Amino acid sequence: MFRKKKIEEGPAPELVERWKAIAAKAAPLTYTDSGGREQRASRQAVYRQAIATLEGGETLPVVIRNLSSAGCRLEFFRQTPLTDRLTIDEHSLALHYEAEIVWQGEGAAGLRFLA
């Protein structure tokens, strides 16, 4: 009841060094596929603000995070379900694509550009 509180020790020094080594690594500028399926287009890490126009005409501000010739990864801040197809517009790269949603999670989605 009246014992001294135990002083909790921090993480082991080996673990701290491992965290520092992981944190020191920079994200790759170009992503590559690890294999095991058909080869997909090379992706580039980007951060571009864009506008997604849903099928009903609603516009949604988004950020393009990964970009390839076949599609992109979007991140958005408003939690809303996206329609099956949308139009993505980004003016600095002159992007204007019709795209379909391949996957969607909380605040992010994967798109495949339609020809």
Image (cartoon, grey):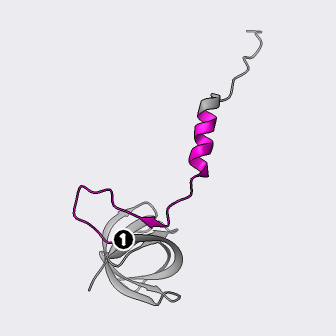
- Residue positioned 34% across, 73% down in the render: 111
- Is 34 covered by the magenta stretch? yes
Q: Quadrant of residue 43?
A: bottom left
- Residue positioned 22% across, 59% down in the render: 37
- Quarter of the picture containing the C terminus is bottom left
Image label count: 1
Q: Quadrant of residue 89?
A: bottom left
Pointer 1 local density, CA inside 10 Å: few below 14, some 14–19, many at least 20: some
Q: Is residue 58 above or below residue 23?
A: below
Relative to 18, 89 lies left or right = left
- Is 20 covered by the magenta stretch? yes
- Residue closer to the observer: 66 or 49: 66
Q: Position of residue 110 (x, y in %)?
A: 36, 68
- Residue positioned 36% across, 71% down in the render: 42
- Residue positioned 49% across, 62% down in the render: 28
- Residue closer to the observer: 90 or 4: 90
Q: Position of residue 79 (x, y in %)?
A: 47, 65
Relative to 33, 66 lies left or right = right
Q: Is residue 32 above or below residue 6?
A: below
Q: Specify the segment rendered in magenta.
A: 15-41
Relative to 3, 92 lies left or right = left
Q: Quadrant of residue 106?
A: bottom left
| Secondary structure at numbered mark 1 | loop
**Amino acid at dot 1:** Ser
Residue with the mark numbered 1: 42
Q: Position of residue 40 (x, y in %)?
A: 29, 68
